[in-house]
Amino acid sequence: MLDQSPNGAPSASDRTIDFLSSTHKLLIDGNEVHGASGETFETYDPALGKTLTSVPNAKQTDVDAAVTAARSALAGPWQKMAPSDRAQVLMRLADLIERDASWISEVESLDSGKPKLHIAAVDVPLAVGALRYYAGWCTKLAGETIPASSPDMLVYTRREPIGVVAAIVPWNFPLCQACFKIAPALAAGCTVILKPAEQTPLSALILGKLALEAGIPPGVLNVLTGDGTTTGQALVEHPGVAKISFTGSEEVGKHIARTASKTLKHVSLELGGKNPNIIFADSDVDTAAATAAGAIFFYTGQVCSAGSRLMVEEKAFDQVVDRVVAEARKLKMGHGLHEETTLGPLISEDQLERVNGFVERSRETGIDVVTGGRRGKGELASGSFYEPTVLTGARDTDGVVTDEIFGPVLTIQAFESFDDLVKRANASSFGLAAGIWTHDIAKAHAAAAAIQAGTVWVNTYNQFDAAVGWGGFKQSGYGKDNGREGLDKYLQTKTVWVNYAR
Ligand code: NAD
């Protein structure tokens, strides 16, 4: 249970304490139920290294029950609900999340380590924005008539839901990743089984209850907490699931694609990134450098779009390093419930060991650790805190440059020319996002065209909007979340031929 004041952690609200002390259950067919096996697992506060609470570990029997419920809701109440009513319940769910935003942010902060204020300012508006944006689409899922050359034939298309969707999400943005999948899937008329990550299961349980309160019929949104290799794997193998909407690591994504092929499921994969953030000397270098610090250190670097590889035109290199290091040193590590905290812990000790491994190998190979490079000390020692770290002198082939570290570790490298830059930036196996900083409009567009990434930000970084598709190229996956493309993947098109010859 949550200890209220170790390491100077501020007390959580009574509502949160009550929630954490309650018995958590799965949500299947509108009912809160114990897992069939009775097995549970613990979730931790990574800032304190302490158990928060336990949740059920859903097994095959629970997955079967959730799939049965989702299939009958698909053909039943959800299909029968008028599109305008479907839109209304999605809008109501958005309102309820806003109503409870402060509480949800507190629970999510404890579960993920992320500062509560960041969750309230970023995650909650993104989640609510997705629900409201896709609510608007419910009434606009029009097919078309096709002028086929056969005589006396009316040919039209219907846009139909693809079926039961398993939404499998990671721990870094639990609430908003869930809504990026639930909102378009429900708008398309699909029903959903949500499986949150084992590290951060709590906001999904809250979301399930709010969905019922919003009037979403039982069985339309089911929530199964559980581990990837049991619950997740059973969902991916289940013949009653039509689509896997996955966000997570490259390795698991590829495993899911292979497994899902056995039942020919539709699969969309939002995977990792090693994103070049590129500063030309003709840009507003100071602003670019300050933003570059935010681009890597936000949520302790545990962000798929993190600008983890900063590439700077030689002339501006020293200025950028100085400013990024100054920004890194301003960050305040601490518990996510402290208002002044700007850098929370890593999600777990395993993650800390992994991040530290990259830095230690860098030290051994002569890469310069300009700032950071150690775990938090003193009051922070029992949490998974890691200092914001800046490395210079890395080669393009070093692991810190090629691999997704998923921690607060930035490499800064110099480049000589436009061509040199494009070649090196594109050498990555990933292709999720990139940033470009320049005042030269021709250079900006040329770089945006040349960089292999699903999103390119020019003179900005980490902009997201429910209306704008998000997804990667290359090993960063396929299929977009958000925007119109984020809806299309939950729909299938049926063609109807009508002979009207008399
Ligand atoms: P992960 O792949 O370990 O886990 C993601 C989810 O998959 C979890 O819910 C997990 O339980 C489940 N899972 C694990 N094994 C499974 C299996 N065999 N079958 C079905 N489900 C299984 O990823 P993570 O560590 O939680 O998240 C970090 C990764 O997510 C990073 O690589 C990051 O870049 C990526 N990510 C990508 C985006 C994006 O939009 N592209 C966004 C956020 C995170």
Image: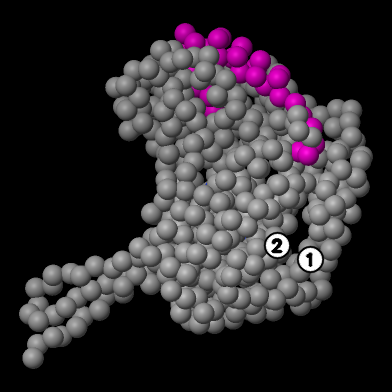
- Which label belongs to residue 205? 2
What secondary structure is found at the residue carrying circle 1? loop
* Range of residues picked out in magenta: 309-337
Q: Residues within 10 Å of mark 2 (few under 14, many from 20)?
A: many
- Which label belongs to residue 24? 1
Q: Amino acid at mark 1?
A: His
Tell me whether the residue at label 1 lies in contact with that at label 2, contact meaning CB atoms closer than 8 angstroms.
yes
What secondary structure is found at the residue carrying circle 2? helix
- Left or right position of 57 against 302: right
Decide if ligand 1 comes within 8 Å of the CB at mark 1.
no
Q: Amino acid at mark 2?
A: Leu
Nearer-the-camera pick, 378 or 415 = 378
**Residue 151 in view here:** yes
Above/below status of 337 relative to 19? above
Counting from the top left corner in percent of width and height, residue 489 is at: 42, 61
Above/below status of 168 relative to 12? below
Nearer-the-camera pick, 386 or 336 = 336
Would you say residue 134 sits in the magenta stretch? no
Residue at position x 49%, y 46% from top?
Answer: 476
Residue at position x 49%, y 54% from top?
Answer: 132
**Residue 416 in view here:** no
Decide if ligand 1 comes within 8 Å of the CB at mark 2.
no
Would you say residue 325 sits in the magenta stretch? yes
Q: Residues within 10 Å of mark 1 (few under 14, many from 20)?
A: many
Counting from the top left corner in percent of width and height, residue 236 is at: 57, 68
Residue at position x 65%, y 63% from top?
Answer: 210
Query: Image quarter for residue 139?
Result: bottom left
